Amino acid sequence: MTADRADYIAGLRALADLLEQHDELPLPSHGASQPLDWWIWEHEVEDAKAVMATIVRLLPGAKSKVVGESGASSWFTVEAKLHGLRINVNARRNTVCRRVVKGVREVTKEVADPEALAAVPTVTVTETVEDVEWVCEPLLAPVEASS
């Protein structure tokens, strides 16, 4: 076991101890209200599909599959639960799935005429925008007594 792995596991145990000992602490959102994302990155592992299969096989209980797409990114997710801990095991879809063309079809759609768009004049507008700076006071600084 590597030192980084041992430190990570110790951190999880320490977090569990804190949550068990302090009811006043809210649950971390990742894992409770939001799933804890476990990403399998192809540049970090030799075989993303095999790693994902091992994780999913070892996670007990019911699981569900989700295929997602966002712009150029496509992913494959297996949703699981360890008691009250929600876990999503994720990988880029092209690293764990096989693309199969089932057929082809023609699609007709309406698009804006590029020549007409090029002929539309532009206008200059003036608007008021805020220039802001975020000042985050140190969280561990002593609290000043109010008068």
Image: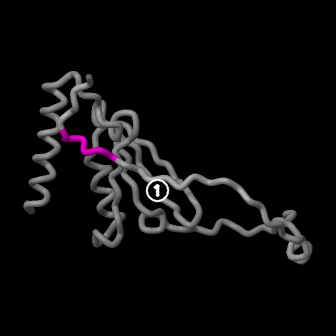
Q: At 42% across and 68% down in the image, what residue appears? A: 95
- What's the magenta bit mostly, secondary-structure-wise? loop
Quadrant the C terminus occupies? top left
Q: Nearer the viewer, residue 140 or 29?
A: 140
Which of the pair 72/88 is nearer the observer?
Answer: 72
Q: How is the image coloured?
A: one colour
The answer to whether residue 7 is above or below residue 113 is: above
For the image shown, how many numbered marks are present on the structure?
1
What crowding class fits label 1: few (fewer than 14 Cα within 10 Å), some (14-19), or many (20 or more)? many
Q: Is residue 119 above or below residue 134?
A: below
Against 15, residue 75 (above or below) is: below
Could you tell me residue 99's position as x and y percent? 55, 68
Q: Residue at x 87, y 63 (%)?
A: 110
| Residue at 13 percent of width and 25 percent of height | 21
Residue 105 is left or right of residue 102, and the answer is: right
Can you give x and y, in whole percent of width and height, for residue 66 in the image? 50, 49
- The percent position of residue 129, horizontal first and vertical second, equals 62, 54
- Specify the quadrant of the image occupied by residue 44: bottom left
Q: Quadrant of the N terminus?
A: bottom left
Assess whether residue 97 is covered by the magenta stretch: no
* Kind of residue at disc 1: Phe
Extreme residue in the front direction: 147
Q: Nearer the viewer, residue 29 or 1?
A: 29
Residue at 81% from the left image edge and 68% from the top image edge: 106
Q: Which residues are magenta?
A: 136-141
The answer to whether 16 appears left or right of 30 in the picture is left
Q: Is residue 130 left or right of residue 63?
A: right
The part of the image, by quadrant, that contains residue 28 is top left
Instruction: Point out residue 12 in the picture as x, y percentages from the top left corner.
Output: 17, 43
Residue of label 1: 76
Helix, strand or loop at label 1? It is strand
